[in-house]
Image: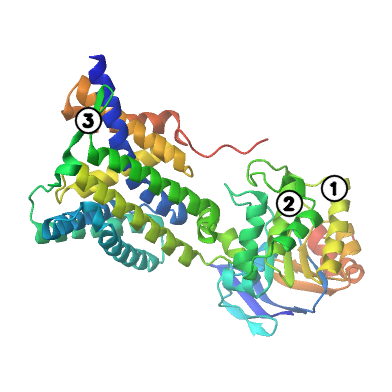
Amino acid sequence: MLRLEDVTVRFGGLVALKEVSFAMGEGEILGLVGPNGAGKTTLFNTISGLVRPRTGRILFKDREIGKLPLHARARLGLGRTFQIPQPMHHLTVRENLTVAQVFGAGASDPARIDEILEVMELAEHADRDAATELALQELKRLEVAKALATNPALLLLDEVLAGLESHAKRRFIAKLRELHQRYALAIVIVEHDIETISSLCSRAVVLNFGELIADGTPEEVFRNPAVVESYTGTADA
Amino acid sequence: MFELLQQSLFSGLLVGSVYALVALGIALTFGAMKIINLAHGELVLLAAYMAYVIESRTGWNPYAAIPLAFAVTALVSIAIYLLIERIREHRELNSLILTFAIGVILTNAILLVFASDVRSTNSPLLQDAVSLGSVYAMNSELLAFVVSLLVMAGLWWWLRNSWYGRAVRAVSSNRDASMLMGIDPRRVELAAFIVAGILASVAGVALYTMSVVQPALGPALTVKAFVVTVLAGVGSIPGVFCAALLLGVTEAMTVTLASSALQELVGMVLFLLVLFFMPNGLFGARARRG
């Protein structure tokens, strides 16, 4: 479904991603982990189209997408959320979703919007102003709901659990599992919490200073000395 | 004196409605692209001259010029957009220079074609005055007020209910996030420019019927529209309407109570006061709860 081949991103003299390569299949849940500044969000930005790679190829559904603009990638089925929710001001929750559906999925299907509102527990907020009348948890759910409305095959979730207290986090993880099954989604999730990655993901890749240093099951990568060292500064911590 | 003030208030409201039409064009393109089209006043002026052309050549009512005015302003709007779209760096700043230059070119083109003479409608029907209780207005002013209200209602409907209107609101809210929802911002920006052209065409024709036009008027219209946009704050059509009426009334009152020489100055003072004390404008976006 998604394949990165030797993707390098530079910001001036800074190498933000260095020859990153990995692939993931349909329906897979992949955890993307690494210390702060490792390049996780840059990788998301590169896949979704906010950042252009200097070299390398990005293939989605066997199609090279490295030079496509963001909206074209969204229409191909690539959904993405931001770490800080980005609701559309002056649009209601329902309008946020319908606009995403019409322009992202190319069709207007009110029944599916109602379904997404129900699944994401936003039905009672449907007619509220998205930017001013929702609490953080609701904004996080709206962020995912907007991406779902574009009918994605792959969902990139950037620290979608950040800022949630433990109970809300557990509920959100259960919700992500439900979405994964209900919509047959492939998911890449950026998350710092090792427990979350272990419980949710079948596989994890680890970035450090822009380089991919480990790729395997969560148990394997979190035992990997290079990964331990990247987090603690010492290999035997 | 009271009747004089009443008349000023009424005249200010009528002229303010046309200011609102001009300002909404600037507000729309600013909302969608975060650029200020400094040639917008010249677009309004172009439309006014189309009304002059239709009236002087055919003897028809100047409002019959709206389709021609729209065609001309739409074509020029598309040309301006395509030029802005080619800007690769610092679009907000460079577009100011670009649209200022386009404004100068348009002013001189109008001067070349129509000379520097002052033009206004010759229609007796439009120039006739009617009495509404203790206040008076020209038919053209009342018609312009009604047309402005109808066009603003149409714009409100378009932004609320059409897919492209919603997309304009989405792009103006967050360009990158809207692209991730599948919206092509270039199409949305072009749509916003064309709708701004429609607003300019109606405003220009209305202006021609109720006032006098001459080639140097464009920059003054742009400044007034910019003042109204800042007074209103970003993101509110009713806000732009109210701010435009406020500017119209303030100017009219200044002429009545002080001097016509101070008319422009008072508008700018109002502009500075709002910038100092209410930087989000009188009707700017609400702060997020919590």
Whether the residues at callouts 1 and 2 have beta carbons within 8 Å, the answer is: no
Residue A87 is situated, as x and y percent measured from the top left of the image, at: 63, 51
Q: Which amino acid does label 1 sit on?
A: Ala
The residue at which mark 2 appears reads as: A140
The reply to whether residue A143 is in sight is yes
Determine the residue located farthest toward the bottom in the rendered image: A62
Tell me what residue is drawn at x 74 percent, y 47 percent: A138
Residue A158 is situated, as x and y percent measured from the top left of the image, at: 72, 60
Tell me what residue is drawn at x 15 percent, y 47 percent: B121
The residue at which mark 3 appears reads as: B263
Distance between the alpha carbons at the discs numbered 1 and 2: 11 Å
- Locate residue B257: give its quadrant: top left
Distance between the alpha carbons at the discs numbered 3 and 1: 59 Å
Labels 1 and 2 positioned on one and the same chain: yes
- Chain designation of label 3: B
Q: Is mark 1 on a helix, strand or loop?
A: helix
Tell me what residue is drawn at x 69 percent, y 65 percent: A109
Image quarter where the C terminus of chain A lies is: bottom right
Q: Is mark 3 on a helix, strand or loop?
A: helix
Disc 2: CA contacts within 10 A as few (<14), some (14-19) or many (>=20): many
The residue at which mark 1 appears reads as: A168
